[in-house]
Amino acid sequence: MADYDAAALKFLHDRRDELFEFTRALVAIPSVNPPGDERAVAQAVVQRLNELGLPDVEVKAKTPERPNVFCRLRGTGGGPTLMLSGHLDTKPIGDRSRWLTDPLKPEIIDGKLYGLGVGDMKAAVAAMVYAAAALRATAAPLKGDLLLAFTADEEAGSAFGADYLVEERLAQADAAILGEPCGIHREWEYLCLLSRGNCCFRIKVWGTQMHSSISDILPSVNASVKMAYVLWRMQRDLPGRIRYTPHPLCPQGVTLNVGVMVSGGVFFGVYPGYAEFACDLRTLPGMTQQGVRQDIEAFLDDLRREDPDLKAELSFEPLPLGWIEPSEMPADHPLTAALQWAAGRVFGACPPLGCIPGTTDAPKFQFGLGIPTVPAFGPGRLPLAHSPNEHIDVNSPLQAAQVYALSALKYLG
């Protein structure tokens, strides 16, 4: 396949400017979620797929304003199907005054391309489109199919995207790659095989609601003060009490974020009778919601024994926020080997295997459709995603397209 590898790389090198401008064009198309409307960016992707002569392009949507784009490049038969997937939506812009540039007018500054969603993950979407075009142009006799699946709604829960694909069985593949940003301190830092799960819950605390002028005359319990004490103790003590099995790809273990939202009280003059705070827990394989519940309840029981006036209750968020499974791509999977080989060709050495600390659509594909999924191998850095001044290196779209094309040739050939 060496000749086809060289031909694919030449195709992409010759079109690097075209790929880069397509990345910029996608960034310039608003697809913020919420509120959520991917029609314009989906149409741009469909148009470019058609211009590149890629076959079997389809749009499927649960509602018209939330389209998912599919494209299948068919092999000769008898081989596996590889799915390349990315989401078309972005987080909202937020505070524009904190951006160095207009977030919807991508600009180059010091070798970096700035723009909303450029790393999360429109550069990866553009790269996947051109990787498929490179395979078509080489006419390599691939046994398996290459499936592109560009989804809606990932940034707000995936109900119209990955969940819809699962419900309708719209995507079938033997393995998948998500082009989520895989770097923390630098781009292309890890080949992420592990995606941590997430467990979101609230601690609800009750006190005595009454006229605040008599709080020092009659027996009273300030729910906000009790809540603050529970929050502080949870921050200090609970992380060491959450049971999990250490994982070599995630040396930091689990991450507990206490007080991601806090509320309580009614108004001035009203002694607070209710307060609550919300938490999220980033989980590892082997953990269960029931196990987490047991650990938190044991912690609260200890606090109640210390303070008989404490009335506190644990409440998990409705699914999926209440429990998103962690997922893992096997290190010995043929696609992992293909990606390691391709990354070695492009970067000179493959990045080490690692973990994306957040959640992705990987568990939806892996557990909902039975597709082993690489949760993150794409341009960008996670700390820049969802942040002002999101940017990537100007070379990243080409590098991503090269990695996706070479790994597809290796895996499908």
Image (cartoon, rainbow, N blue to C red):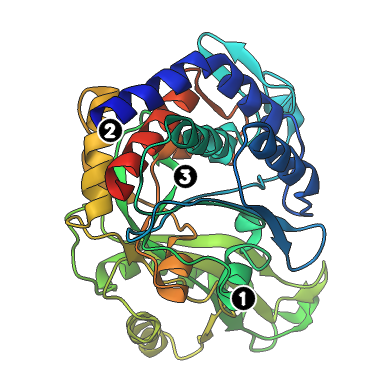
Nearest to the observer: residue 93 or residue 48: 48
Dot 3 corresponds to which residue?
180
Q: Quadrant of the N terminus?
A: top left
Dot 1 corresponds to which residue?
168
Nearest to the observer: residue 170 or residue 305: 170
Of marks 3 and 1, which one's residue comes earlier in the chain?
Answer: 1
Residue type, mark 1 in image: Glu
Q: Residue at x 74, y 84 (%)?
A: 209
Of marks 1 and 2, which one's residue comes earlier in the chain?
Answer: 1
What whole-number distance in Å separates the C-alpha atoms at marks 3 and 1?
24 Å
**Relative to residue 167, is residue 390 depicted above or below?**
above
Q: Which mark is residue 343?
A: 2
Residue type, mark 2 in image: Ala
**Relative to residue 115, is residue 151 depicted above or below?**
below
Residue 334 in the image, given as x and y percentages of width and height: 22, 54
Residue 403 in the image, given as x and y percentages of width and height: 36, 33
**Relative to residue 332, is residue 96 depicted above or below?**
above
